[in-house]
Amino acid sequence: MRDLPLVPSLADAPDDHLQGHVWVQELLDGATVRFAVADAGYLRLGDDEQVFDEVPPALRYAERAIDRTFDIGAYLGTVDEPARYTFVGVATHRRHVDYDWDRLPAVLGTAIRDRDEERWLPPDRVDGVFDRLGPPPITVVEKERSVDQQPLLGYELPASAWHDGPAAGVTFVDKRGNRARLVRDDVPPTEPSVEVDRADPRALAGRFVTDDLVAGRAAALGERDEPVAFDSLFEAVVDRVARAYHDVLFHGVTETGAVDLDWRRFRGAVAEQVRRWQDEN
C-alpha cells in the first residue's frame, strides 16, 4: 500500500497546482483511512501514517464498514494486479462537527492512488469506481468548475449534506487528480480532547447505549434485510457508539491526564445493555 502525498491547503498550493476544470467535494471532519487488496486477495487497512497489522479500536468501525461495503470479488474480477491501487476514504466519527450519525455512512470514498503511475485517478473515475464497488463516494458539491473563469480563492463553503450547518470545508480536484483543501477556521485538523468526569467502562456504556439507540440500530439492520441476531446488533451498536461518542471514548481527559479506556471491558458493558434490550423487547 502506497504512502499518501499531503494535500495542500488552497492558500499554500502552487499557482499551477490545479488546472482546467475541478470537481468540488464536501470535506468531512473525519479521519483519513486507506485500504488496498493484497496480491493474496485480502484487504489491508491503514490511516494517513501507517498500515495496520491490527486495526486499533478507534477505527474498527471503519474496518467493518469497508469489509461490508467494498465488493472485493468484483474488484478482483476487473484488475490484473490487485495491489496496484490504494483506495482512500474518510472515516466519519465525532471530532469537531456533530453530524447526523444515522444518515452519514461510516466510510466514504474520496480518492484512488495508482501505484504504477504514481498519480491520483481523475475525480469522475473515482466517483464511478466507488459507486460501483463501495464504499459510497464522497458528496460532490460542484462539477466542472473552471479554475480560470471562476477563481477558487474566496470560495463560499456550501451547506453540509450531513448536518444542519456549513460544510467543514471542501476539496478541489482537477482532471489530473491534483487536490487542494479549503477548511473552516474553526475546524482543527487534529482529534479533540474532551474533559470527562470518569472513565469507567460500565458508566460510559450506561450513558451512551440508550434504548432508543439500540432500537434504531435494530431497525436499520431490518431495513438492510440483515438478521437482528445478538452478534450483528451488538456490533452495530458498538460501531454507532464509537462513531457518535468517539471524542469521549478515545480522547477523553480527566484531572489526572488522558483516559486509556479499557475497550474490552467497554464492549462487555455494551453487550450487557444490548442483551437487556433484547430480553425486554
Image: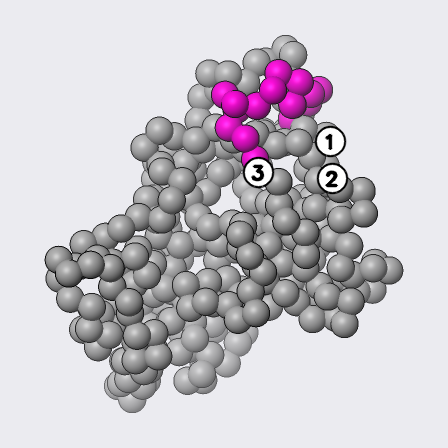
Return the residue at label 1: 176
Callout 1–callout 3 Cβ contact below 8 Å:
no
> Which portion, as a residue range, is magenta?
7-22
| C-alpha gap between disc 2 and disc 1 | 8 Å
Mark 3: secondary structure: loop
Residue 19 on the magenta segment = yes
Using the image as rendered, state which of residue 140 and residue 148 is in the foreground.
148
Q: Residue at x 63, y 49 (%)?
A: 3
Q: In x, y percent, where is residue 14?
A: 60, 20
SS state under label 1: loop
What residue is drawn where x is 49% and y is 54%? 91
Viewport quadrant of the N terminus: bottom right
Look at the numbered disc 2 and give the secondary structure of its residue.
strand
**The quarter of the displayed image where residue 150 is located:** top right
- The answer to which of marks 1 and 3 sits earlier in the sequence is 3
Q: Are marks 2 and 1 in contact (CB under 8 Å)?
A: yes
Can you name the residue that lies furthest to the front here? 256
Going by the numbered disc 3, the residue's amino acid type is Leu
- 28 to 12, vertically: above or below: below
Q: Hey, what amino acid is under mark 2? A: Arg
Q: Residues within 10 Å of mark 3 (few under 14, many from 20)?
A: few
Is residue 201 depicted above or below 22 in this figure? below
Q: How crowded is the residue under tag 2: few (<14 C-alpha within 10 Å), some, or many (20+)?
A: some
Task: State the residue in front, 67 or 40.
Answer: 40
- Mark 3 highlights which residue? 6
Q: Residue at x 46, y 50 (%)?
A: 31
Image spot of residue 125 (x, y percent): 74, 42
Q: Is residue 166 left or right of residue 67?
A: left
